[in-house]
Amino acid sequence: MQDRSARRAAVDSLIANQAACTSSLLHVVEGDAATADAYARTLAGVLAEWDRALPHRPSRRAQERLTRLRRGLLGTGRWYVNGEWPEVSSAVVRVDGAFDLAGHPGSRLVLVRAVDDLRRALPLLGPAVSTVGIAPEETRLALRDAVAACGVDNVVPLGAAEHGYAGRPHDGMRVLNRLVRWVNG
């Protein structure tokens, strides 16, 4: 189950090399630190497969930001790195504390955080979070309204963040409404 979740979550994380508003930067795992570490190791292995299939090299600036994070804000995190410093192709960091996602460098870096109950992750959400993928499906359905109430636009099955449809709300906007005149008859 953990391998399947990591594979699906990796798909969500690698959308446009983490530059899209729908790409996942933080994975929240229900369980203790050991469970999150096991997931992070599995996810790092999945990212290594992606690195081999679609080679990736962070920009010089991204490499510098990753090094600063490893020495600073994320210095106490448990790092699972693919590649050698400073040229890391991807990395997963299990973190315990809060991290401002606005400072996330992208470049195939995924943060993993453990919570004892997924409802405890709700304070991490807000209007700046575009999409949340949740598995299994029964958990997604149970949390969907609470997640949406935090201001999240899309609550999707894990691994489906990139799936869209014509007229889908994007970045908090209903773009199709600007292009269509609705008439009732």
Image (spheres, rainbow, N blue to C red):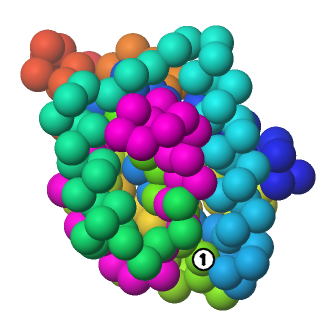
- Residue 143 x, y percent position in the rendering: 59, 69
Residue underneath mark 1: 114
Q: Is residue 95 above or below residue 152?
A: below
- Residue 16 x, y percent position in the rendering: 38, 22
- Residue 101 x, y percent position in the rendering: 27, 59
| In the foreground, 70 or 174 | 70
Q: Is residue 12 above or below residue 80?
A: above
Give residue 128's quadrant in the image.
Answer: bottom left
Q: Residue at x 44, y 36 (%)?
A: 88
Q: Specify the amino acid type for callout 1.
A: Ala
Q: Residue at x 64, y 45 (%)?
A: 44
| In the foreground, 106 or 75 | 75
Give residue 122's quadrant in the image.
Answer: bottom left
Q: Is residue 108 above or below residue 139?
A: above
| In the foreground, 168 or 56 | 56
Q: Is 37 on the left-hand or right-hand side of 71?
A: right
Label 1: element kind:
strand
- Residue 30 x, y percent position in the rendering: 68, 75
- Asked whether the viewer can see residue 22, the reply is no
Q: Which residues are magenta?
A: 80-106
Q: Quadrant of the C terminus?
A: top left
Q: Residue at x 16, y 35 (%)?
A: 61
Q: Is 176 on the left-hand or right-hand side of 138?
A: left
- In magenta segment, residue 20: no
- Asked whether the viewer can see residue 72, the reply is yes
- In magenta segment, residue 94: yes
Q: Residue at x 82, y 54 (%)?
A: 2
